[in-house]
Amino acid sequence: MDALRVSVWRGKESGEFRTYEVPQFASQTVLDVVTYIQRNLEPTLSYRFACRVGMCGSCAMTVNGKARWTCRTHAAKVAAGNALEIAPLNHLPVIKDLVTDMTRFFDKWAQAQGQFRGERTRKDDFARVKPDSAQRQQADAGIECIGCGVCYSACDVVAWNPDYLGPAALNRAWTLLTDVRDIARVERLAAVAGDAGCHACHTHMSCTELCPKHIAPTASIAGLKRAVTGAVLKGEL
Amino acid sequence: MLWIAQRASAAVLALCVIVHLITIIYAVRNGLSAAGILERTRGNYGWFVFYAVFVAAIAVHAPIGLRNILSEMLGWRGAALNLLVLVLAIALALSGWRAAFAVFT
C-alpha cells in the first residue's frame, strides 16, 4: 500500500496545512493516522481524544471537508486516493492545531435548557416509564448523542447565524421535552423558540447525514417547531 | 410568531398563486383585452376579496423571508432590520390593495 499523504492544520485561527507521509495499515482509523504523526513525525501536534471507541465524543475533526468522529472512521474509506486533509471542526474557535474550544457549543446546551428537571426526590419511588410508549420512543431516538460537535460543525445555519443553538442543543431539548418525567416544558419551549432557536433550521439535514450515532436532529428540531406552534396556539408562550 | 405567520401565509399563497395563474392563462387564451378584464373585475366583490387576501399574504410572507435572508447573508440583525421589513410590509400591502381597489372601482 502507498503511504498516505496527510495534510494537517497547524496553528490557531491563522495557520497552514502541513503535509506528512504516513504508512497505511489495515483497519487504520483517522485517529490512528493523527496519533502516528504526533508520536513519530510532529511531537508538538495537538489533538483531542479519550476513549477511542466512539463513546466520549472528543475526537471529532474535519476530514477531507466533512466533520467525522475520527476514532471510528477508517482512513481508507474517506481518503481521496491516498490523500487526507485533517482540520479542526468548523464554527468553533481553534485553540491549537486540531483542538477547538467547545465552550460555545456546550453553553448553547445550557441556553436550550438542556438540564433535566424532575419533581421527584430521592424519597419518592422510581418513575415508571413504558419503553414502548410513543413519547419514550421519541426521546430514545435522540438520546444517544455523545456531544461530539459533528452536527454543529456541519450546520450551515450555525455559519450564517452564530447565535443559532445548533442541532445538538436542540436535539437535547427535544429529548427532555419528550421525557414524561421532565417538568420544564414551557420554559424549554421558550428557550428554543425565536431567531436563534429551532425556527432558524432550514432542514438542510447535514447534521442528520453526518451524525456518527445516526441520530436525526432534523427530526427533533421539526418536533420542537410543532411543539412551539402548539404552545403558541394554546397561549402557553 | 413570525415563523407561524410565514407558514400560514405560505399556505394561503399556495392557493392564491394557483388561482392567479389559472386566471392569467384563461385571460390570455381567451384573448381578453384590458377593457374585457376590467369589465369582469369592476364591482365584483369576489375578485376584490380574493386579491385583497392575496396581497395581505404577500405583505406578511415576503418581509419575513427577506428578514431571514438579510440576517443570514449579511449578518444584519436588530431594530433597524425589523423597521425596514415592517416598512416593506406596509408598502407592499398599501400598493397591492390600491391596485386591487383600482380594478374594482
Image (cartoon, rainbow, N blue to C red):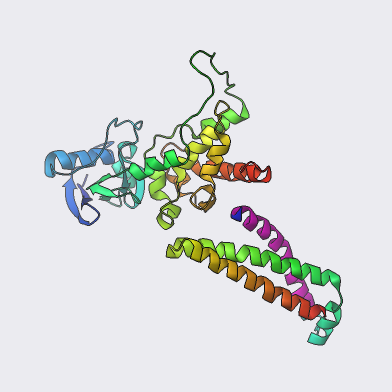
Where is residue A90? Give x, y as percent: 34, 51
Above or below for B53 versus A129: below
Name the quadrant containing residue A107.
top left
Q: Is residue B69 left or right of residue A95?
A: right
- Give the percent coordinates (x, y) of residue A222: 57, 45
> Main structural element of the magenta stretch: helix, strand or loop?
helix
Front residue of A91 and A119? A119
Count up the numbered dots: 0
Q: Give the residue at x 47% y 41%.
A: A112
Residue A22 placed where, x, y %? 18, 45
Residue A14 on the magenta segment:
no
Q: Quadrant of the N terminus of chain A?
A: top left
- Residue drawn at 60 percent across, 30 percent down: A135
Toward the viewer: B26 or A166? A166
Which residue does the image show at 56% across and 18% down from the upper left? A127
Image quadrant holding the C terminus of chain A, namely top right
Up-down: is B75 above or below B35? above
The residue lying toward the viewer, choosing from B25 and B49, is B49
Q: Nearer the viewer, residue A84 or A141?
A: A141
Q: Is residue A64 left or right of residue B84?
A: left
Name which quarter of the figure residue B22 lies in.
bottom right
Numbered range of the magenta stretch: B3-27
Q: Is residue A87 visible in this depiction of the protein?
A: no
